């Protein structure tokens, strides 16, 4: 894997990211797991394999989607149920007939993003979630459900609401009690802003993110996403923190379950297979997971069409090839200190191509 190691080093030298952690696993065995560069530029903190990252939109598949998997498995929800049948406030609105499947596959008709934080930050924190949900109900659809595919944070904000209604507890509490805890994943967690940071640090090193203009500081162990921040650090679209090791722990569980191999029994094979299957209709999404859209996939040219993955704005990503039994987790702090650095867009596919070539050479 020398070529992989050299490419990661060049990523640091060329300013793709200040630092990163790369984990590669093939056939259930970790074949590469190393840290590169710096977790923070000033003062300098070295990156380690145990560094905790703001996982950004990896929250969508690794938290919100997994929570919905469990609710479907327990018979409390069906992917083809409508919002109006689950969330009373949605009945009688244009959101009523949107199905859970449409939200998970980004074909709901909802917009991609709105800067809700600008309104919410002006009201007391205790009132923000209720106010957000009024804004979500008032948000106009930009096309009919099922007509087009548009990646949407807003859809996953609604899915968090749905999890809360059915599970009768907050998303962070539900996934901790029902998923991360049972799997022994101590380093996958949300950081509610109501909790003192010292209580959740546990001597962990956090990868710094952006020098935030409106918060007036470099963010470190505090959620970067503006909307998630004003909502208290817990949201359906962003807010999850974690290490590469524990992201792998969850992905390995999903992959083993999907393949009917030894697993914890937390999730059922048929449920995982349903969620990791690419959906028909517009777009290239499975349920909560992306699939490679050639020729420009961030997974490069060699991941099969039986692959699922996701990207995070902070510089995080994973791709999991169900056919090749291959998992690649790349966690970086590419937005430190500025989100204007977009060099990772060309780096990611090159890295994945180099990894696959290296593994083929080894075999």
Image: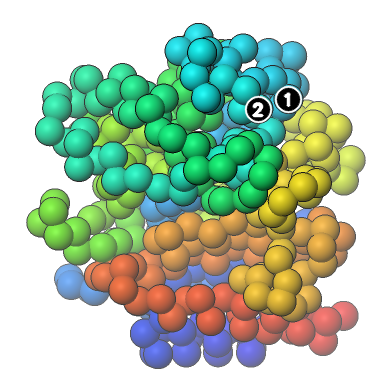
Residue 252, horizontal then vertical, whole percent: 71, 49
- What is the CA distance from the residue labelled 1 to the residue labelled 2? 5 Å
Q: Secondary structure at mark 1?
A: loop
| Disc 1 packing (10 Å; few <14; some 14–19; many ≥20) | few
The residue where tag 1 is placed is 80
| In front of the other: 83 or 306 | 83
Quarter of the picture containing the C terminus is: bottom right
Residue 228, horizontal then vertical, whole percent: 33, 40
Relative to 278, is 171 above or below?
above
Residue 321, horizontal then vertical, whole percent: 77, 61
Q: Which of disc 2 and disc 1 is earlier in sequence?
A: 1
Relative to 362, is 104 above or below?
above
| Disc 2 packing (10 Å; few <14; some 14–19; many ≥20) | many
Q: Quadrant of residue 298?
A: bottom right
**Mark 1 in CB contact with mark 2 (< 8 angstroms):** yes
Q: Secondary structure at mark 2?
A: loop
Q: In the picture provided, is 81 more to the left or to the right than 233?
A: right
Q: In the picture provided, is 345 more to the left or to the right than 74?
A: left
| In front of the other: 258 or 216 | 216
Give the image's coloring scheme.
rainbow
At x 21%, y 33%, the residue is: 120
At x 49%, y 61%, the residue is: 316
| In front of the other: 278 or 303 | 278
Q: Is residue 46 visible?
A: no
Relative to 360, is 155 above or below?
above
Q: Which mark is residue 99?
A: 2
At x 43%, y 51%, the residue is: 56
At x 36%, y 85%, the residue is: 15
Q: Is residue 353 visible?
A: yes
Quarter of the picture containing the N terminus is: bottom right
Residue 137, horizontal then vertical, whole percent: 41, 25
């Amino acid at each position: 894997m020398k070529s992989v190691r050299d490419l990661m080093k060049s990523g640091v030298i060329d300013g793709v990211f200040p630092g990163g952690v790369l984990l590669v696993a093939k056939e259930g065995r970790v074949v590469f797991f190393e840290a590169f560069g710096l977790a923070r530029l000033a003062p300098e903190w070295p990156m380690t394999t145990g560094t905790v990252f703001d996982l950004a939109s990896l929250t969508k598949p690794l938290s919100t989607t997994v929570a919905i998997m469990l609710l479907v498995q327990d018979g409390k929800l069906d992917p083809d149920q409508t919002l109006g049948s689950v969330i009373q406030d949605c009945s009688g609105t244009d959101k009523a007939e949107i199905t859970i499947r449409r939200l998970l596959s980004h074909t709901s008709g909802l917009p991609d993003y709105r800067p809700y934080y600008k309104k919410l930050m002006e009201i007391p924190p205790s009132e923000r979630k209720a106010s957000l949900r009024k804004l979500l109900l008032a948000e106009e659809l930009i096309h009919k459900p099922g007509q087009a595919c548009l990646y949407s944070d807003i859809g996953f904000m609604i899915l968090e609401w749905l999890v809360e209604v059915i599970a009768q507890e907050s998303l962070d509490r539900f996934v901790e009690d029902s998923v991360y805890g049972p799997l022994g994943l101590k380093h996958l967690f949300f950081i509610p802003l109501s909790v003192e940071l010292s209580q959740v640090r546990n001597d962990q090193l956090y990868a710094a993110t952006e020098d935030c203009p409106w918060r007036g500081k470099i963010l470190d162990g505090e959620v970067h996403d503006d909307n998630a921040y004003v909502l208290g650090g817990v949201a359906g679209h962003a807010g999850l923190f974690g290490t590469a090791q524990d992201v792998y722990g969850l992905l390995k569980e999903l992959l083993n379950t999907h393949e009917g191999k030894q697993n914890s029994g937390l999730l059922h094979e048929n449920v995982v297979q349903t969620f990791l299957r690419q959906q028909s209709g517009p777009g290239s999404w499975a349920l909560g997971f992306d699939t490679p859209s050639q020729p420009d996939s961030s997974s490069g040219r060699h991941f099969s069409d039986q692959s699922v993955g996701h990207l995070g704005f902070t510089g995080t990503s994973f791709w999991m090839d169900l056919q090749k039994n291959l998992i690649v987790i790349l966690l970086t702090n590419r937005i430190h200190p500025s989100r204007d650095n977009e060099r990772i867009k060309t780096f990611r596919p090159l890295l994945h191509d180099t990894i696959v070539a290296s593994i083929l050479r080894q075999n």
